[in-house]
Image: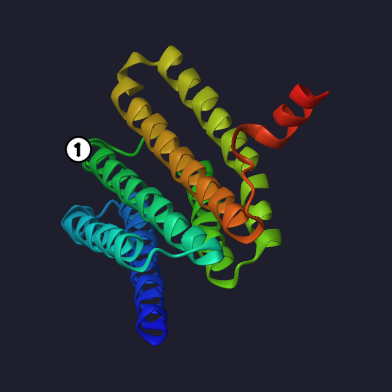
Amino acid sequence: MERKFDEELRDLNEKLLRMATMVEESISLAIKALKERNEDMVQEVLRREEDINLIEIDIDELCMKLLALRQPMASDLRFITSAMKIAAELERMGDQAVNIAERTEELLKYPLLKPLIDIPRMATIAQEMVRDSINAFINHDEKLARAVCERDDEVDNLNDQIFRELLTYMIEDPGTIKRAVNLILIGRHLERIADHATNIGEDVIYLVKGKTIKHHIEEKRGELKG
């Protein structure tokens, strides 16, 4: 029975890693489609969405089976519940990749507004956060998970910078509004990807330490006790 349970946990881990790889590839492809103005890549991102959704369902079903039939305790229970949360975050990242592809599809109808500099930089950081959050989960690396959470501000600052620059374009020339809005939305989608990676980092800290850091809860509990 114990050996079977270990096999099921390994299967869960492998499914989660496969899903993370699929999501990371979709994000990368969506940004590449934007930079290269490639319609075929856009359609490939859209096509991959169903595959990501299906593997999330597989993970959810496996987690529910393990919870119901194995009644795991302590660290195994945290692992399974964390896996469910992480799969949900990955699925939302996949949705954001689709959103970027859809905005790119709209942008392909018009000439390039400006050279793309900050958006690719922002995408690189967000992708690194996704990769590091999954590596932190694989290796139960609390330090790496915290580093992911700390990088979120870097993405937020770039997103604010992109918004301010594009707002200037729209004010100076109303003819740029459609293109600028689509680029602003792409920045927003990348910011959300970074947020989801941060959530995974927080889930990893819960998995390793058994404590929640979401919403700065430790500080707030300390204030209440004081």
Identify the residue at horizontal 37%, vertical 27% (top origin). 180
Number of on-image labels: 1
Q: Is residue 28 visible?
A: yes
Image-based side of 115 in relation to 136, left or right: left
**Residue type highlighted by circle 1:** Lys
Q: How is the image coloured?
A: rainbow
Q: Quadrant of the C terminus?
A: top right
Q: Nearer the viewer, residue 100 or 215?
A: 215
Q: Quadrant of the N terminus?
A: bottom left
Q: Nearer the viewer, residue 78 or 175?
A: 78
SS at circle 1: loop
Q: Is residue 121 visible?
A: no
Neighbour tally class for label 1: few under 14, some 14-19, many 20 plus, Cα within 10 Å: few
Q: Position of residue 174 (x, y in %)?
A: 34, 14
Q: Position of residue 145 (x, y in %)?
A: 63, 56
Identify the residue at horizontal 38%, vertical 55% (top origin). 84
Rendered image quadrant of residue 102: top left
Report the residue marked by disc 1.
109
Looking at this view, name the residue that lies furthest to the right. 226
Looking at this view, name the residue that lies furthest to the bottom. 3
Q: Is residue 1 above or below residue 164?
A: below
Q: Nearer the viewer, residue 163 or 203?
A: 203
Q: Position of residue 201 (x, y in %)?
A: 57, 52
Q: Position of residue 83 (x, y in %)?
A: 42, 59
